[in-house]
Image (cartoon, rainbow, N blue to C red):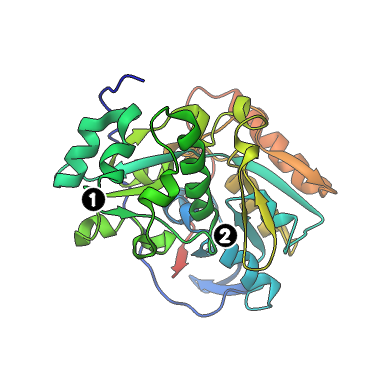
């Protein structure tokens, strides 16, 4: 396959929200704003959603929201072990709703793709830029690039990195066993701080989600659809041929990247937040991939949820641009 210049994107820098530790997130709580007591909706979410929730969702909801972000496998474990009891839980892989969470229903509301984000100002980043979309793995195999990735035992991005490299070893003619040639334990960082390693100078590149690169205005190499886990056309014959077993013994099969969300504690406030969370245009602004059918549902979906999201989608389809109809008066505390 011929090499070529990398496909890159430059986007407006969306700064991270102010982080503050506010204790353990509960299902709902009270927050006094101007003397009025308002319900607080707690969301426990995948780390890759953190910035979008803190900076996109907060402009579109009219109740206060608390967001705590971790790797999705950690999110599932914290709930399963009783460490957290949020109103809404959102994970980067709906397989985690099969076990250990097993809610009675959930939505699939967005997707993503795996990319190679890089710093073009470092020697390793320049090597990647020169290698391009079809030869990006060569400087990695040669050891010329300091790589960052996440832990496959903690979050889906970690095991999707393994899936991507396994698929790449089949896709490229001269790239056998890329996992063994490229990966080292020392490359692992928490998902919520992976790309901040660029600022510290610890890495030249990161195997990341597209939205993570878009949000932080990093250059990135767009990978072929056959290996980036974003194209439904390759879900059955390609993506599903990979798998990873979590420490719990649960086997995760490769597939299309699908973010899922559910409400664990129903209330009017939770439904209103869930509606915007799963139908809002802020997701696309933050680099996530949307499809016309989103959100889709599995299980016994409450009628109030289905009606709210169907109404929002109908309203959105009539608009030419992003909607500003919902007042932006929410305060969000991000818990790290």
Corner quadrant of residue 99: bottom right
**In-image side of 179 versus 41 (left or right):** left
**From the viewer's perspective, is 139 left or right of 58?**
left
Q: Residues within 10 Å of mark 1 (few under 14, many from 20)?
A: many
Is residue 208 found left or right of 83 in the rendered image? left
Mark sitting earlier along the chain (1/2): 2
Q: Is residue 67 above or below residue 280?
A: below
Q: Residue at x 41, y 61 (%)?
A: 192
Residue 250 shows up from this direction: yes
Name the front one of labels 1 and 2.
1
Question: In the image shown, does 250 or 326 lie closer to the viewer?
Answer: 250
Quarter holding the C terminus is bottom left
Q: Which residue is drawn at the image coordinates 72% and 64% (left, top)?
A: 100
Q: Which mark is residue 167?
A: none
Q: Is residue 262 above or below residue 7?
A: below
Residue underneath mark 1: 204
Q: Nearer the viewer, residue 184 or 52?
A: 184
Residue position for label 2: 72
Residue 4 image point, x, y percent: 27, 22
Q: Are marks 1 and 2 in contact (CB under 8 Å)?
A: no
* Position of residue 316 measured from the top left corner of the image (x, y, whole percent): 59, 30
Where is residue 267 shown, x and y percent of the image?
73, 61
| Residue plotted at (56% across, 29% down) | 231
């Amino acid at each position: 396959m011929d090499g070529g210049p990398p496909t890159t994107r430059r986007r407006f820098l969306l700064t991270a929200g102010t982080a503050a530790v506010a204790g353990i997130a509960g299902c709902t709580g009270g927050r006094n704003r101007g003397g009025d007591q308002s319900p607080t909706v707690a969301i426990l979410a995948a780390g890759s959603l953190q910035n979008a929730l803190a900076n996109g969702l907060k402009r579109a909801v009219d109740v206060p929201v608390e967001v705590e972000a971790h790797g999705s496998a950690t999110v599932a474990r914290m709930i399963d072990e009783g460490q957290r009891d949020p109103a809404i839980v959102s994970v980067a892989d709906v397989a985690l709703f099969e076990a250990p969470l097993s809610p009675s229903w959930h939505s699939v509301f967005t997707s993503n793709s795996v990319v190679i984000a890089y710093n073009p100002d470092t020697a390793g980043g320049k090597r990647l830029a020169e290698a391009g979309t079809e030869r990006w793995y060569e400087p990695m195999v040669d050891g010329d690039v300091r790589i960052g990735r996440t832990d496959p035992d903690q979050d889906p991005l970690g095991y999707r990195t393994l899936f991507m490299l396994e698929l790449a070893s089949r896709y490229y003619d001269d790239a056998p066993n890329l996992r063994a040639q490229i990966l080292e334990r020392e490359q692992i960082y928490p998902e919520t701080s992976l790309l901040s390693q660029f600022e510290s100078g610890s890495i030249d590149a990161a195997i990341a989600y597209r939205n993570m690169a878009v949000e932080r205005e990093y250059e990135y190499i767009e990978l072929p659809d056959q290996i980036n886990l974003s194209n439904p056309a390759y879900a059955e014959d390609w993506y599903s041929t990979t798998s990873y077993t979590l420490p719990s013994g649960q086997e995760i099969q490769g597939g299309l990247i699908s973010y899922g969300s559910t409400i664990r504690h129903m209330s009017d406030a939770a439904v209103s937040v869930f509606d915007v969370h799963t139908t809002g245009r802020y997701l696309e602004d933050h680099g996530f991939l949307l499809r016309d059918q989103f959100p889709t549902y599995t299980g016994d979906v409450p009628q109030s949820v289905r009606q709210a999201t169907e109404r929002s989608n109908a309203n959105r389809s009539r608009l030419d641009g992003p909607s500003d109809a919902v007042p932006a008066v929410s305060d969000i505390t991000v818990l790290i």
